[in-house]
């Protein structure tokens, strides 16, 4: 962006635009399956992903006359008839039983009102595909084949030039708590689509048991495809993607448990970014009335693109500088004395107005975030987090957590800190945990008890096992030094190390990526010269500290094919997939690594976007307040 002191380089990694077109084609196919006019009933969770590939005008062009959000209903308790202007009804939803119940409630009410013959024609498109559980439910209700079932194979949603998401916010709980590996199957299918488009991932490297299972699925599916069809891209290594790195979220839980300090990360923590969109006060965008949805991937907002990965400590100052520059540009009209100068000013007026609107939005967002970050509670939470990861004694931090609870801090903030203390120190004392559990339930309600049980089951918040000799050494303590997770010399204004995203703590997951990519050589080169060095080769786990290899979960390195020879100056892309979710802070760290290397770019792929509070909410079977 003009005037920004650090504009991101033009993206020259693998072009993800074909995936957007693929999603648009899939949606068009589902809509065109009903050539007549239709009413669309949509799962609210799909509004974000679909909003990134099609707008209301595009839906109307495909025959959609009216659109409703689906609401949960049960045919056994509350049959609900749909009053739609069209005979054909099209349901777009995920293959979940609750939505099959809603469909059945509509169908039953329609049949009852029409003496057994439904007034409407029902079609359901399941994203990304049908499941046997859903089909079984519809069969039991005798709705098949009257209800037509289609698959809507929406896989990766594209968030900007370098982020892909399966938009599955419940994947962490499904995979690690409930043992439901459906998300892994969806991930493997989506990754196979990437291989069909750009060629075989030459190498798959990763850490974690479910990451290893995903790798196995990919290898097996490739063999199955080659055995049944002639697919050239699956037979040769990609020329654009040099490796796939797969990381299991349980390999690094400290990162999501800490408060993100990048602009976009903090925005997600405080305001909540859902499927790429942020709900804001209408006044923030110069309107009135109901809250507005604003797209938050930087595609249409160059100011957001320039600010999103910055540490929040410098965002206010940058906004002030941008405001001064825009004001100066507006003053240019007064200095225009010739027709040519006036014409030049008018030609820039549209972009100035767009920038001004963007500046108003981000100024309002920043002011709201400042109200949070300048509060005493925020500083207390941040201090406890930094003390825990910095190696301070745990007893004073547990006392500080108790004090926060006494002051009425939000329950999930308190639980999040307790989880961090437990995870970093390999558990907490049983007596403290018992008291903490009792107090939390009494203060905030029994709705939090299932969450605490789930955290204990996952060994995130648990009592320290009794050890016959000496103190128990936590996994964090073993890897903090070799991975250089704590950095006391961080430069937030001109970051040279990924630790800037937490103002002194590096995301462990991204340090693993650096280890795999031999990024240490790049960092050393950066200290010796100003220009960006070429990317080091993918090293896998060769030469990595044994403590790192001792992290929980499988360690794997699979060579699918020898990478094709490439010029040293050719830009290649490394795909990093996070099983169980990724934070905006980790994305910012990988973007810094992309900027630091001349010939390697990183693309992030994930089951969904997460932060500590969203992970905790997902582990409970009831709605919890932040």
Image (tube, rainbow, N blue to C red):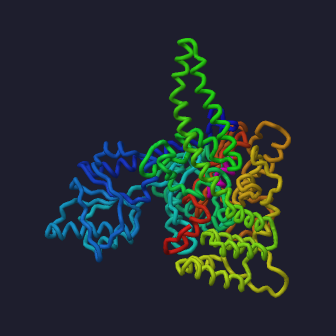
Assess whether residue 584 is covered by the magenta stretch.
Answer: yes
Could you say where residue 389 lies in the image, as x and y percent from the top left?
76, 65
Question: Can you tell which quarter of the image residue 57 is in?
Answer: top left
Q: Residue at x 55, y 57 (%)?
A: 272
The magenta segment is 583-591
- Quarter of the picture containing the C terminus is bottom right
Q: Among all residues in the image, which is located at the extreme top?
A: 338
Assess whether residue 245 is covered by the magenta stretch.
Answer: no
Q: Residue at x 73, y 38 (%)?
A: 568
Q: Residue at x 80, y 56 (%)?
A: 487
Seen in the image, is 562 located left or right of residue 45?
right
Question: In this picture, is 473 found above or below 365?
Answer: below
User: Main SS type for the magenta part?
Assistant: helix
Question: In this picture, is 511 found above or below 60?
Answer: below
Could you say where residue 481 lies in the image, as x and y percent from the top left?
82, 63
Residue 264 seen in this snapshot: yes
Along the viewing direction, whichever of 352 and 195 lies nearer the viewer: 352
Seen in the image, is 611 located left or right of residue 292?
right
Along the viewing direction, whichever of 379 and 434 lies nearer the viewer: 379
């Amino acid at each position: 962006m003009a005037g920004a002191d650090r504009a991101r380089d033009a993206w020259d990694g693998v072009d993800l635009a074909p995936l957007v077109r693929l999603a648009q084609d899939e949606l068009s196919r589902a809509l065109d399956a009903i050539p007549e006019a239709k009413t669309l009933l949509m799962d609210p969770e799909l509004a974000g992903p679909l909003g990134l590939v099609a707008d209301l005008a595009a839906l109307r062009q495909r025959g959609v006359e009216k659109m409703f959000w689906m609401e949960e209903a049960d045919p056994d308790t509350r049959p609900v008839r749909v009053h739609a202007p069209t005979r054909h009804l099209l349901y777009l939803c995920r293959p979940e039983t609750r939505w099959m119940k809603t469909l059945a409630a509509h169908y039953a009410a329609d049949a009852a009102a029409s003496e057994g013959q439904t007034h409407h024609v029902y079609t359901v498109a399941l994203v990304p595909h049908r499941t046997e559980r859903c089909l079984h439910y519809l069969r039991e209700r005798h709705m098949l084949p009257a209800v037509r079932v289609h698959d809507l194979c929406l896989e990766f949603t594209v968030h900007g030039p370098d982020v892909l998401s399966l938009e599955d916010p419940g994947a962490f709980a499904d995979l690690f708590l409930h043992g439901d590996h459906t998300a892994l199957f969806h991930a493997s299918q989506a990754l196979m689509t990437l291989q069909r488009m750009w060629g075989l991932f030459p190498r798959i490297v990763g850490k974690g048991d479910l990451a290893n299972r995903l790798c196995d699925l990919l290898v097996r599916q490739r063999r199955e495809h080659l055995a049944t069809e002639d697919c050239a891209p699956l037979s040769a290594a990609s020329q654009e993607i040099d490796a796939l790195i797969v990381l299991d979220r349980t390999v690094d839980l400290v990162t999501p448990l800490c408060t993100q300090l990048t602009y976009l990360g903090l925005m997600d923590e405080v305001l909540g970014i859902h499927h790429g969109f942020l709900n804001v006060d209408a006044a923030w965008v110069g309107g009135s009335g109901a809250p507005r949805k604003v797209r938050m991937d930087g595609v249409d907002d160059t100011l957001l693109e320039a600010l999103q990965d910055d540490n929040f400590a410098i965002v206010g100052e940058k906004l002030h500088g941008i405001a001064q520059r825009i004001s100066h540009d507006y003053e240019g009209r007064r200095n225009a004395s010739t027709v040519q100068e006036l014409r030049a000013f008018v030609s820039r007026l549209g972009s100035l107005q767009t920038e001004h609107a963007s500046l108003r939005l981000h100024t309002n967002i920043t002011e709201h975030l400042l109200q949070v970050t300048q509060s005493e509670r925020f500083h207390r939470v941040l201090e406890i987090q930094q003390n825990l990861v910095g190696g301070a004694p745990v007893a004073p931090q547990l006392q500080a957590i108790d004090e926060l609870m006494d002051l009425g801090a939000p329950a999930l903030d308190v639980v999040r800190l307790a989880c961090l203390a437990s995870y970093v120190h390999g558990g907490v004392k049983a007596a403290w945990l018992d008291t903490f559990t009792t107090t939390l339930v009494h203060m905030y309600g029994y709705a939090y008890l299932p969450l605490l049980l789930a955290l204990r089951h996952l060994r995130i918040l648990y009592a320290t096992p009794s050890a016959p000799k000496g103190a128990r050494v936590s996994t964090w303590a073993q890897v903090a030094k070799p991975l250089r997770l704590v950095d006391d010399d961080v430069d937030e204004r001109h970051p040279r190390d990924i630790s800037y995203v937490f103002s002194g703590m590096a995301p462990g997951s991204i340090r693993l990526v650096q280890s795999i990519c031999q990024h240490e050589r790049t960092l050393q080169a950066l200290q010796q010269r100003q220009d960006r060095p070429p990317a080091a080769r993918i090293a896998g786990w060769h030469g990595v500290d044994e403590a790192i290899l001792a992290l929980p979960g499988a360690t794997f390195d699979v060579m699918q094919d020898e990478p094709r020879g490439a010029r040293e100056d050719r830009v290649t892309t490394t795909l990093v997939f996070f099983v169980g979710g990724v934070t905006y802070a980790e994305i910012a760290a990988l973007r810094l690594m992309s900027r630091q290397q001349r010939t390697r770019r990183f693309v992030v792929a994930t089951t969904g976007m997460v932060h500590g509070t969203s992970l905790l909410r997902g582990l409970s079977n009831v709605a919890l307040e932040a």
